[in-house]
Image (cartoon, helix red, strand yellow):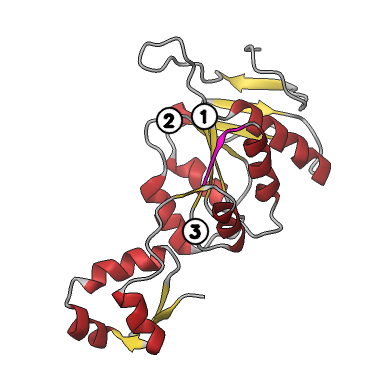
Amino acid sequence: MPQLPEHHAPITYIMGKFPRAQVLGSAQWQTPVAVMGTRKPRHNNIERLDRYLPSDRYILTTDSRGTNAFVRRQVETSRLVIVSLTPTTEPCLCNVVLNLPNRGWAHARRNDLIAEISGELLVVEAKRNSNIISLAERFRQKEKRVSAFPGASGCDALIAGGAKRVGGTLTTSPLIDFLKVRDRTLNQLIRHFGVTVLARLVEMELDNLVVRNNDLVSLGE
């Protein structure tokens, strides 16, 4: 078993090779970026993750469904580290197995391990009472960077508490002020701002700032 930092979670065994590749020929070891999210992610957050998922780092996630499953599909096997309570059959560079039952206390042990062996955390989507919020707190206690996409209540709370905002846009602009008066149709927006407003709307949808229902555009909640 490779030499890992001290932690409180009992690793039963490791399948594959734990990432210990040197960075730029230096003596520093590259640690994975943990990418986590809800089991039922909104489609716009999945699209946004596809744009912001680090392409030059090892990526660590769990064997959970939803956001984490998308991460596993998007990351090359040679860069993927999966932390799981029981062994997974999904292809990856490394599967760190705790061999614990699927219980709340076991997830807390898993969080301890993730925070220990990861260099930073990217939260894609989370509610305020999500297990990911406690994971983010573990990263902060270790003075490791936490980043989050805005929009979900838990992510907004993390950002308000000091997490780095990823992929966000300004919450005030002429377009937002225009929509504050009332909902607008696409034609009304194009007449007022020009056709370039369509690209801006796509970005704002990804950040949950606006919602489109057929031809009608309104501010997000």
Name the residue rendered at 44%, 38% in the picture.
75
Q: Nearer the viewer, residue 133 or 164?
A: 164
Which residue carries the number 1 mark? Answer: 32
Which residue carries the number 3 mark? Answer: 150
Q: Is residue 67 above or below residue 112?
A: below
Q: Nearer the viewer, residue 165 or 198?
A: 165
Residue 145 colored in magenta in the image: yes
Query: Is residue 191 left or right of 174 when viewed as pictured?
Result: left
Amino acid at circle 1: Pro
Query: Which of pointers 1 and 3 lies earlier in the amino acid sequence?
Result: 1
Q: Give the quarter of the figure containing the N terminus.
A: top right
Q: Quick check: can you spot residue 85?
A: no
**Where in the figure is residue 83, as x and y percent of width and height?**
64, 33
Amino acid at circle 3: Pro
Q: Which mark is residue 57?
A: 2
Query: Is residue 154 left or right of 211 when viewed as pictured?
Result: right
Query: Which of pointers 1 and 2 lies earlier in the amino acid sequence?
Result: 1
Q: CA distance from mark 1 to mark 3?
A: 22 Å
Q: Which mark is residue 212?
A: none
Residue 12 colored in magenta in the image: no
Question: Which corner quadrant of the image does residue 16 belong to?
Answer: top right
Query: Is residue 168 left or right of 59 when viewed as pictured?
Result: left
Q: Specify start and end residues of the magenta stretch as a single range.
A: 143-147
**Where in the figure is residue 133, as x and y percent of width and height?**
66, 49
Query: Which of pointers 3 and 2 lies earlier in the amino acid sequence?
Result: 2
